[in-house]
C-alpha cells in the first residue's frame, strides 16, 4: 500500500474533489519532494472505489497539514437486502491533520498525473 512506502507528513491539503460517476476522491496536496531543500510540489492523490468519506475537523485558518495516515485495515460492508444485497471489501484509513481527522474507505490509492 502507498501509505507503507511514502511519508505524507507535512503535506498540505489544498483541495479535495469528489467524482461520483467514477467513485473517486482526489486530494490535491502540496507534497514534500526534497526535505533537505524544503521543496514541495503539487500532486494528486486519488482514492478509487470510495464508499465512505468523513471530515471531522475544527474550523481552521489555512490549509490542513497531514500529520499521519493510519491504516485501519480491511472492512466488509453489506448494502441492500435479499437479491439486491451487495457486499464490498474496502481498505479504511484515517488521515490525521493538524485540524482533526478524515476517514476514507476505498479499494485503491495512488498518485495520478
Image (cartoon, rainbow, N blue to C red):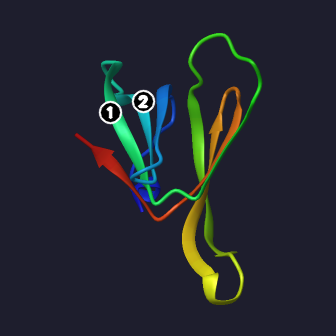
Report if the CB atoms under discs 2 and 1 are less than 8 Å apart: yes
User: What residue lies at 47% left-to-right and 48% top-to-bottom?
Assistant: 20
Q: Residue 43: which numbered mark, if any?
A: 1
The answer to whether residue 21 is above or below residue 71 is above
Q: Toward which corner of the image does residue 43 lie, by quadrant?
A: top left
The residue under the point 41% across, 31% down is 28
Residue found at x 75% / y 18%? 59
Q: How many marks?
A: 2
- Work out whether residue 11 can be spotted: no
Dot 2 falls on a residue whose secondary structure is strand
For this orientation, the residue located farthest to the top is: 61
**Vertically, is 23 above or below 19?**
below
The residues tagged by marks 2 and 1 sit, at their Cα atoms, a distance apart of 5 Å
Label 2 crowd (10 A; few <14 / some 14-19 / many >=20): many
Considering depth in this image, is 44 or 34 the residue closer to the camera? 44
Instruction: Examine the rendering and report whether any part of residue 62 can be seen.
Output: yes
Question: Which image quadrant for residue 89?
Answer: bottom right
Residue ID for mark 2: 29
Specify the quadrant that holds the C terminus: top left
Name which of mark 2 and mark 1 comes first in the sequence. Answer: 2
Amino acid at each position: 500500500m502507498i501509505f507503507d512506502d511514502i511519508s505524507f507528513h507535512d503535506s498540505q491539503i489544498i483541495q479535495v474533489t469528489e467524482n461520483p460517476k467514477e467513485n473517486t476522491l482526489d486530494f490535491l496536496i502540496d507534497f514534500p519532494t526534497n526535505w533537505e531543500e524544503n521543496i514541495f510540489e503539487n500532486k494528486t492523490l486519488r482514492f478509487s472505489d470510495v464508499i465512505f468519506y468523513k471530515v471531522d475537523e475544527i474550523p481552521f485558518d489555512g490549509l490542513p497539514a497531514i500529520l499521519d495516515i493510519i491504516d485501519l485495515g480491511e472492512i466488509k460492508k453489506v448494502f441492500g437486502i435479499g437479491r439486491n444485497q451487495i457486499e464490498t471489501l474496502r481498505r479504511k484509513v484515517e488521515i490525521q491533520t493538524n485540524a482533526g481527522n478524515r476517514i476514507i474507505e476505498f479499494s485503491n490509492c495512488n498518485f495520478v498525473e
